[in-house]
Image (cartoon, rainbow, N blue to C red):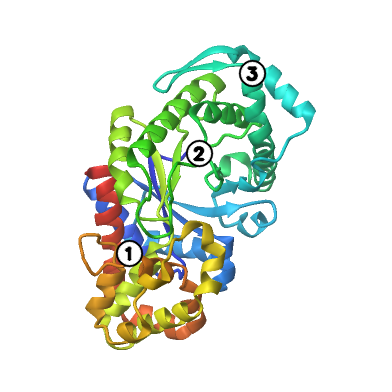
Amino acid sequence: MKLEKFSLGMGDRFLHQGNAQLQAIVNAKQAGVDITPVWNKSNREHQTIGTDPLSLREEADAAVAELGWTGNYHVDADHINLSTVDRFIDCSDFFTIDVADGIGLRASDENIAEFVDRHSKYVGSLAIPGSGVFDVSKETIEAVAVTFLKAVKLAGQIYRYIADKKGADNFIAEISMDETENPQTPLEMFFILAAIADEGIPIQTIAPKFTGRFNKGVDYVGDVAQFEKEFNEDLAAIAFAISEFGLPDNLKLSVHSGSDKFSIYRPIREALKRTGAGLHLKTAGTTWLEELIGLAEAGGEGLAIAKEVYKKSFQRMDELCRPYAAVIDIDPAKLPTLEAVNDWSGEQYAHALRHDQSNSEYNQHFRQLLHVGYKVAAELGDRYYDALKEFEFEVSRNVTENLWERHVKQLLMG
């Protein structure tokens, strides 16, 4: 199973927007850009909402049938580990293997010594085309092994477990190393890929850590020029590692954006055009926010639900934010009061929530709180699901427009 050059990870917490999401991919194809859709949903989201992984497969299959999609598509077991993977084995064909917990844990001295010895031919001056020339000592290689080898060996264990259950040719493997404190240098990336090759993992995407903050649902916070440098260096390290270690020739970067990192789309687009490289982008959960926008614009019961979700999210802020504390920055003083929101029209609610930074009413703090407030909507049960059905036109229009206009066009067609 081989992943195409461009792929888009699409989150859908409530499993109602498969058609609207896929329509954005159809729009891209009609415009001459081929993108493979990848539906993704994490174990945490399934547990919070009360769904099971099979439901995501059913949603994807139904959307593909409804729209007559004839291209490839995938269902991603998002950020799995050994304790959670079993739920996803039968219904997923893309596995994001998350080894963040293993980064910084030390492998055995024997494993470290074996790794250093195996790659000692790189001691001296190592040129990574497009990235630079690096002085490499045995201590350099050992330092990478001390930090990352344990995590890669854990990835190998998980990969082989999945391969044993599904067959090695029946899924796509990604390794995620983005949820760590420091970005990997290009030299570290090169030796991480060496370790991955040693483990026999035919990864097709890798998600590194980049400088800056990738907060949920809002734009990138950081030095865009530094991100551009790191992105290009990672592309170079991957290209070199493919030739050196025999990794799959379609291996590409995966950017776990937390959604809507519009300010880095230009440097990504330019780098892809310059190098001919591919990309996997996970847009995560903005689909849920587009649902709220659509409900608010619909008025009536839709707007009432949108206001109630904000009210309860505001009242339960600490509880809802705690699991996402590392990837949100909310200033409570900049949140609208409950009284103010209660008086808003649907248009005002939509303007505050929609990620349009040219609109003076847009409020990134309001948006981030609602991003993590999906648990509140889940607790509304049938009332929320019935509203999605009743106001399907308003909701789906926003979902498609978001993916097509703000993501696909800006990332690959600007």
What's the CA distance linking mark 2 and mark 3?
22 Å
Which of the pair 17/310 is nearer the observer? Answer: 310
- Three-letter amino acid code at the position of disc 2: Pro
What's the CA distance linking mark 2 and mark 1?
35 Å
Q: Which residue is mark 1?
A: 20
Q: Residues within 10 Å of mark 3 (few under 14, many from 20)?
A: some
User: Looking at the picture, does residue 8 appear above or below residue 160?
Assistant: below
| Chain-order first, disc 2 or disc 3 | 3
State whether residue 393 appears in this view.
no
| Chain-order first, disc 2 or disc 1 | 1
Which of the pair 2/220 is nearer the observer? Answer: 220
Q: Quadrant of residue 278?
A: top left
Image coordinates of residue 242 in percent, x first then y, are 50, 25
Q: Which residue is mark 2?
A: 183
**Marks 2 & 1, CB-CB < 8 Å contact:** no
- Three-letter amino acid code at the position of disc 1: Ala
Q: Residue at x 43, y 86 (%)?
A: 383
Q: Which mark is residue 395?
A: none
Image coordinates of residue 195 in percent, x first then y, are 63, 29
| Chain-order first, disc 1 or disc 3 | 1
Q: Which residue is mark 3?
A: 119
Q: Residues within 10 Å of mark 2 (few under 14, many from 20)?
A: some
Task: Please identify, in this view, whether the residue under mark 1 or under mark 3 is nearer the observer.
Answer: 3
Q: Residues within 10 Å of mark 1 (few under 14, many from 20)?
A: many
Task: Please identify, in this view, whether the residue under mark 2 or under mark 1 is nearer the observer.
Answer: 2
